[in-house]
Image: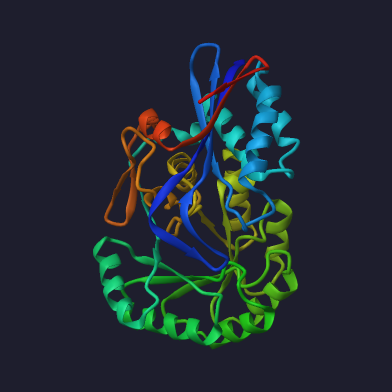
Amino acid sequence: MTIADITLHRLKLPLTTPYHVSYRVYEDFDPIIAEIRDGHGRVGWGEGHVSPGYSAETVDSGWAFCRAHAERMTGLEIEAAKAQVLAHVAESPVATSVLVSALEMLEGNPRLDIGTRATLPLLTPFHATAFEDIPPEVEARLKEGFATLKVKVGKDVDSDLARVAAVQAAAGARATIRLDANRGFSKDDGCRFAASLDPAGIELFEQPCEASDWDANGAVAAVSNVPVMLDESIFGVDDIERAANIDGIGFVKLKLKKLGGIERLHAALRLIRRLGMEPVLGDGTSADICCWMEACVAIDTITNAGEFNGFLKPVVRLFAVPMNFTDGALHLDPGFKPEIDRDVMDAHLVARERISHGARAAAG
């Protein structure tokens, strides 16, 4: 199966509600989308969102990586194209995943074929910061069917502890809570926060300290009253194996855009469980294509609430027939294959470039 042409799309998708993390506030998502066709007109789609501040990657660097490798990929067989891109995965994991997952879809990767209906509970971000707003938001999220709430922390130990306690009191035993610091704590503050937590209803505490500061994250895990999960620290098998040797690390979260493709993601999730930890999957800043692929992989790898909920945050959906989301869960029907709504994509287009047999042609 030979690659005939590749079209790259760069979008800007405004969000219905600003999405807060410890290091920035998202007003929109900026996914890069690859559309890869073979000589018979079959198409595969891949998508990745470079989150500024999450790693050293930028949207511009990811776009440049995709353009450069698309030039080399056209005219190649799929396996050769995958090998060519994966040899450079360390340079840009997100951009690599965009291209490789599109190739995997094009070749008919069986993990994207749903044989029976799958229901995958999702978590929901929790936004309220004022104490009087916490109980109403808890009730609203429960009414929507969500059973896992994600509470962002990492700014101030005392105010974070008070807010977490307020969410616990409002939720009671009706919901599970995940805490996420997004690397916001120093070692000392992370330790004080984690050691002061009441564990009631709290599933895990995610990424207390800087991604590269394994000693600080390990110190927090050692004193934490709840299991610690690593996210930003994890970019591959070596990192997963390193996490498994740290006391108190009970969870590892993966995202398709960090692993370089569907098959690599699936294998890494299985490895986490073999090493005695619990895998968590999903990217809250991805759009429809990536979230769909993560959901397909989740079916036989994940037993907890999925974090592939980014597709719910923009004001638009990229699929002509949107994925079925009701009662706090994503429902995948047998045989579901996404069809891109090109009108929606065109309405939110920032840049587009088509590469055919090594010849680059820009389009508006």
Q: Quadrant of residue 225?
A: bottom right
Q: Nearer the viewer, residue 247 or 125?
A: 125
Q: Of all residues shown, which one is farthest toward the front?
A: 364
Seen from the viewer's position, the closer of residues 223 and 183 is 183
Q: Nearer the viewer, residue 232 or 70?
A: 70
Figure quadrant of residue 189: bottom right
- Above or below residue 66? Residue 362 is above
Residue in view at x 62 percent, y 80 percent: 190
x 72%, y 67%: residue:
245
Q: Is residue 339 visible?
A: no
From the viewer's side, name the closer residue of 213 and 200.
213
322 w.r.t. 42: above or below: below
Quarter that holds the N terminus: top right
> Up-down: is 75 above or below 254?
above
Picture coordinates of residue 46 (x, y %)? Answer: 53, 34
- Residue 336 horizontal side relative to residue 107, left or right: left
Q: Position of residue 283 (x, y in %)?
A: 51, 52
Q: Residue at x 37, y 50 (%)?
A: 312
Measured as percent of width and height from the top left, residue 78 is found at 63, 22
Q: Is residue 350 left or right of residue 135?
A: right
Inspect this view and state whether residue 146 appears.
Answer: yes
